[in-house]
Image: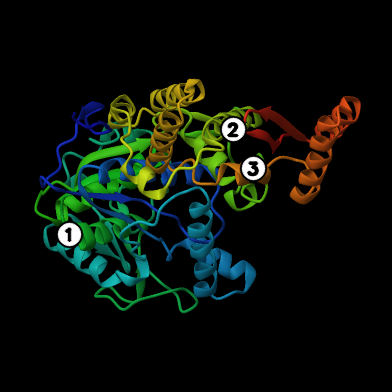
Amino acid sequence: MTIYLHDTRKGKKVPFEPLKDDEVTMYLCGPTVYNYAHIGNARPAVVFDLLARVLRRRYTLIFARNITDVDDKINKMSAETGKPIDEITAKYVKAYNDDMAALGVLPPDVEPFATHHVAEMIEMIRALIDSGHAYEAEGHVLFDVSSYADYGSLSKRNLREMIAGSRVEVAPYKRAAHDFVLWKPSTPDLPGWESPWGVGRPGWHIECSAMAAKHLGRTIDIHGGGQDLVFPHHENELAQSRCAHGGEDFARYWVHNGFLSIDHEKMSKSLGNVVLVHDLIKTIPGEVIRLTLLSGHYRQPLDWSKETIDSARRMLDRLYGAVRGIDVSDSERREAEIPEALVAALEDDLNTPRAMAEFFGLARSLNKATDADERRRLAAQMYAVGDLMGLLQSDPDDWFAGHGESEMSAGTIEEMLEKRRSARAAKRFAEADAIRDELAKAGIQIEDGPEGTTWRRVD
């Protein structure tokens, strides 16, 4: 089978062919660490974590996800709070990684920090000046967009149209409004590094180009990110990287996930609907958040709402319910074969809706099976699929005990179930039914089966 990805630059789904036969390089734009990540930030983290898992089945993958720890938003946060910049960035780097881990996002192979790569950025800027693609003006260095004929090829924007409709402030040191900053001067109260153009700091776009080249090479296989980054960030990365490297291609495939809305509205501070992952994971299991983000095709818009969250929770309840009570060893889980149709769905441009349909088909087969060995084999397959997709990572009993609105302790629930078992054994059915009703009112659903009574919390 061939892996297919939708390439933004080509505007269509194409076969994936890495530069090297057995190795793939992938770069994802990571967080700017001045605040907690919102749910929109989490979507690319989850999507490209899944892509990384799929790629690792076939290739050796080197996956880099950067940390932007020098930025005007960070400077502003420092000024507003009076806290040192390094204290702010250290706090939110840890928060980001912890929050993403709660969503089942595995650490990248490389996590480069922008502040650790200023020397590489300065070298790239020098190369751009030397090749006539950048110019110095009043302590700034700017990329001369007119020097790169293919500018706009990624975002499908015409340069003349961009100029005509530009809302970019024409700073006095710019030759043209669309030229973008590679280096800017710093006052004593701002972070700064010595450079041939004076003490200053890098522009945002040059950071990713330099870090990608340093850790993955001049030409990488896949560059990922949210659709909001196509222009200007990725367009600018593409232009400056090719110009700094003598026309060598920067990324062979550009992959972007779609926008995320909140209850059918754009998420924004002005609307007061920014949803932080740090807050969500306090009340919603990380796997529910992960599956919600994977419930639609990654390139399509996704609406974050109570309905989509509840749907993901019910889906996971069905999956955990299928494997509950079946003992599967770690070796059986590792060695189980994932159904080809499910792998094919994921390798077809990460078609998660189709993959989930296959997953539920597996669960239905397990629910219908009566032979113990067959049930264990199917359960092992389900766990193997879960490991690929970052799902089914909890013990089923813990899953059903661990979420829902009921505050009744697990010990109290078990005591009540024991009383119910005794009442049923003594044929005091009215008493047993009363205990069931009391548990139901407390948000505890019980299910009687051939292997005994199980329970789970429900909203």
Q: Determine whether label 1 and label 3 are within 8 Å by CB.
A: no
x, y percent for residue 64: 30, 56
Is disc 3 placed on a helix, strand or loop? loop
**Number of the label disc, if any, that sits on residue 317:** 2
x, y percent for residue 247: 10, 49
**Number of the label disc, if any, that sits on residue 128:** 1
Identify residue type, mark 3: Ser
Q: Determine whether label 3 and label 2 are within 8 Å by CB.
A: no
Is disc 2 placed on a helix, strand or loop? helix
Q: Residue at x 67, y 36 (%)?
A: 454
> Does residue 163 appear anywhere in the picture?
no
Front: mark 3 or 2: 2
Q: Residue at x 29, y 51 (%)?
A: 27
Q: Residue at x 32, y 67 (%)?
A: 138
Gap in Å between the C-alphas at discs 3 and 2? 36 Å
Identify residue type, mark 1: Leu
Q: Within 10 angstroms of label 2, few (less than 14), some, or many (20 or more) residues?
A: some
x, y percent for residue 445: 74, 32
Q: Earlier in the sequence, mark 2 or mark 1?
A: 1
Front: mark 1 or 3: 3
Dividing the picture into quarters, in which one does residue 161 lie? top left
Q: Quadrant of the N terminus?
A: top left
What residue would you read off at disc 3? 270
Q: Earlier in the sequence, mark 1 or mark 3?
A: 1
Q: Nearer the viewer, residue 455 or 269?
A: 455
Identify residue type, mark 2: Asp
> Does residue 370 appear anywhere in the picture?
yes
x, y percent for residue 112: 33, 64
Q: Is residue 130 left or right of residue 455?
A: left
Q: Within 10 angstroms of label 3, few (less than 14), some, or many (20 or more) residues?
A: few
